[in-house]
Amino acid sequence: MSAEAQILAVVGAYLALSLGVGWRAGKGTSASATGYVAGDRAMGALLMYFVTGATIFSAFAFLGAPGRAYSTGAGAFYILAFGVLGLVPFYWVGPRAARLGRSRGYITQAELVAGELSFRPLAPIMAVVSLMAFVPYLALQMRGAGHVLEVLTAGKVSVEVGAALVYGVVLLYVWRSGVMGVGWTNTLQGVFMMSLAWILGLYLPGVMHGGVAPMFEKLDPEFLTLPGLTSQGEAWTWAGFGSTVFVMTVGFSFWPHLFQKAFAAKSEAVLRRTVVLYPTFQLFLLPILLIGFAAVGMDPPPAEPDQVLPHLLLQLELPAIVVGLFCAGALAASMSSGDSILHSAASIAVRDGLIVGAGVSMDARTERTAVRWALLPVLIISYVTATMFHEDLVGLLTYAYGPVGQLAPPVTAALFWPRATGPGVLAGLVLGSGVTLGLPHWVDGLAVHPGLPGLGVNVAAIVCVSLVTRRRG
């Protein structure tokens, strides 16, 4: 059997295991939208820990982060900065959302905001903003999966075919089991990719440089000096670095697929415990960055920075089965976020777009069926985006944080500011999103992340319009 065949056999076995775990995970949940989308609000501490960590750390971490360390040096440290801080707001926001979800039946972020402000038009607008962020984020996961299979099979499996194969499996178990399929496969994938990350992160610097310390001694000190380089290889300013960390920190807890897990938690104590334990998941990123630094100066270099990890594995001529296991670990990183994004995007489209926004009436079983069918267009649009968009993986994620960061002020205002009104929050969301998406096209060489001025406009609009309008109900 050829090396490529052995690699594909190992990957196939891993995909089959993921499918089996995800398929069985739906047993025991109710045949309702609450069961399919929120797991009957019964997720315990173990599932919450892994679904939170594995949902965020994805193809951008396992493939994009080493690529960013390899190409930008200290510029990659911004990933650690926003990751450490990002979930802190969830300690207060998550339990309050969970409490309201149990008492009022909310299962999505936009439904909560629209319900608390008694302003239905907010739900479909927030759904659109969420989907604008979700599509590039899901496309990122698909490109990551495709990259791995393309490199490790020497091009015999293209990016497009690889992405289709992996996400065909994801579609099957998400279709069958909903959020519980996401939760249990994320647990499997989280354990798998964390273990492999540490093995790789210590092994590669050791075999290539004699250890981690000798590896850093060989690198140019300027390459390791903050703020480092941008993804285009230009010097990154402190304004650009700091604003990117700030915007991504603000947006972190408000990703709809992460926020939605608040409605699935067994209790408020489980959510708080998850936030407290979450920093331990950050340890997963340290060896990932070491992999990128180990590849600096290697000959031949990878075709693209995002291909550093699979390129290194092939250059070291490891046994095909070992390479296949590491390949499966990279796919686990992609799938652990992709399944959650896909599931959340479909539930948002139905619940917020049709039921809350358009007022379409559905019983529990019909809603669950509608969410399942909504998986297909979300997957197709993201797949097309993945095949057309050629930005690096971390750059793609950094872009997506711009729109999603605009969800933070509306959610915070709805939960904690009694004076906030629906028109105020709507004005902030629309204007903030417009500024975030428009600035890169209006201003050449923008010095800060476009999400920062977007957040400023968003907050100002919420305050000003809310002070001159009234909350309904």
Image (spheres, helix red, strand yellow):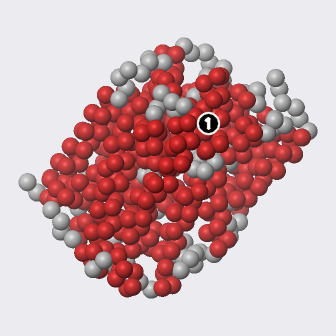
Residue sitting at x 35%, y 76%: 212
Q: Which structural element holds mark 1?
A: helix
Residue 7 image offset from top left, x and y in percent:
19, 54
User: Horizontal and vertical percent for residue 365?
Assistant: 48, 15
Looking at the image, is 237 positioned above or below residue 384?
A: below
From the viewer's perspective, is 282 left or right of 171? right
Image quarter of the C terminus:
top right
Q: Residue at (33%, 33%) from the top-left corner? A: 22
Position of residue 175 relative to residue 320, above or below, is: above
Q: Is residue 348 left or right of residue 161?
A: right
Q: Nearer the viewer, residue 90 or 23?
A: 90
- For label 1, the crowd category at 10 Å Cα-Cα, with few meaning under 14, some 14 to 19 and many 20 or more, is many
What amino acid type is highlighted by mark number 1?
Pro
Q: Which residue is mark 1?
A: 95
Residue name at image x 48 percent, y 85 percent? 221
Q: Is residue 425 left or right of residue 292?
A: right
Residue 272 percent across, percent down from the top left:
56, 42
358 relative to 265, above or below: above
Q: Please tell me whether residue 65 is drawn above or below residue 227 in the rendered image.
A: above
> Residue 152: x percent and y percent?
25, 59
